[in-house]
Amino acid sequence: MSNELAVLMCASNAESTLATAIESILLQTYREFEFVIVENGSTDGTWEIIASFKDPRIRAFRTEIRRLPFNLNFGLLQTRAKWVARMDADDIALPQRFERQMAFLLANPGIDVLGSSFHIFGNDFAERVIEMPTTDREIRKSLPFFLSLCHPTVVMRREKIISVGGYGLTYSEDLDLWLRLSRDKSVRFANVPESLLKYRIHQKQAKGFRESYFAAAAVLYREALIQSSVRYFLASLFMVAKYSVGNIVGVKRVLTKFGFLKKSF
């Protein structure tokens, strides 16, 4: 197994997309990695799909706890690799993803967390690229108001993630992690300026919609207190307002659909 790179994926009731996601990792042009997959509390055929892959790089585990942060921390403890790449069970990594990211890290040894731009696709969305800020300064500046690191695109220095206690048990586990890492000014963030992942938009993501918004507001408010930052406090208010406005727009669309309003907003 590689001591340089481990890929970490958690999967729960993901049978409709899982095989494609796993295949996109196994077909990477960068071949030297271990692939840690943690199946957690599935009631469908998720485990059977994982077990059907015989690639020796795969190390599969099962837990009964259906909380993503717990299973991410469990997965982090199953490897000693220097770098950990995140991958979700419903996304598709482009074939050159790890080749590009590992080359970037080799050329920029000070970087600790490296993401990339990405495509969005699925449902009725027209596929398009979401461009991400590329430098540490740009990422830190935009982070409170814009999630400037896409979690399933990142490759992270494992020792840095462990040093801040891994993932917190919150719905916004990625934002929470980036904010805790950002307290250390020696930590460096970056994004590769090209799309290396296809990020799938689908109905199941709406399940934790309200919880995610308020969890994000809570971690931003916490950082406002810890860092004595007016900027983070304003960001927490912005997150609540963003959710509230989204709810109002959603209600108006429903009323329009059933003829109670004359036009959509």
Image: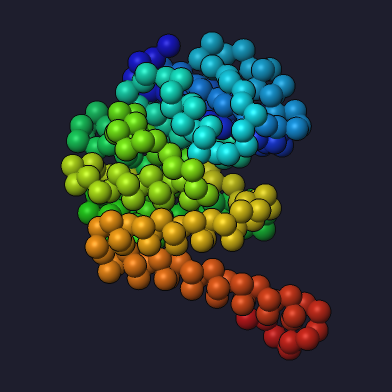
Farthest residue toward the right?
Answer: 258
- Relative to 118, is 241 above or below? below
Count the marks. 0
- Relative to 49, is 211 above or below? below
- Relative to 182, is 100 above or below? above
- Relative to 199, is 250 above or below? below
Answer with left or right where residue 179 lies relative to residue 128.
left
**Residue at x-position 32% and y-position 57%:** 223
Depth order, front residue of 227/135 = 227
Image position, residue 117 (x, y; %): 41, 48
Image position, residue 83 (x, y; %): 35, 27
Quadrant for the N terminus in the image: top left
**Residue at x-position 38% and y-position 62%:** 221
How is colour applied across the structure in the image? rainbow
Image position, residue 44 (x, y; %): 76, 32
Say if residue 229 shows up in the picture. Answer: yes
**Residue at x-position 43% and y-position 27%:** 76
Farthest residue toward the front?
Answer: 225
The quarter holding residue 66 reads top right
Image position, residue 220 (x, y; %): 38, 59
Farthest residue toward the bottom?
Answer: 262
Depth order, front residue of 42/16 = 42
Quadrant for the C terminus in the image: bottom right
Say if residue 131 shows up in the picture. Answer: no
Answer with left or right where residue 11 lies relative to residue 27.
right
Answer with left or right where residue 171 lies relative to residue 167.
right
The quarter holding residue 257 reads bottom right
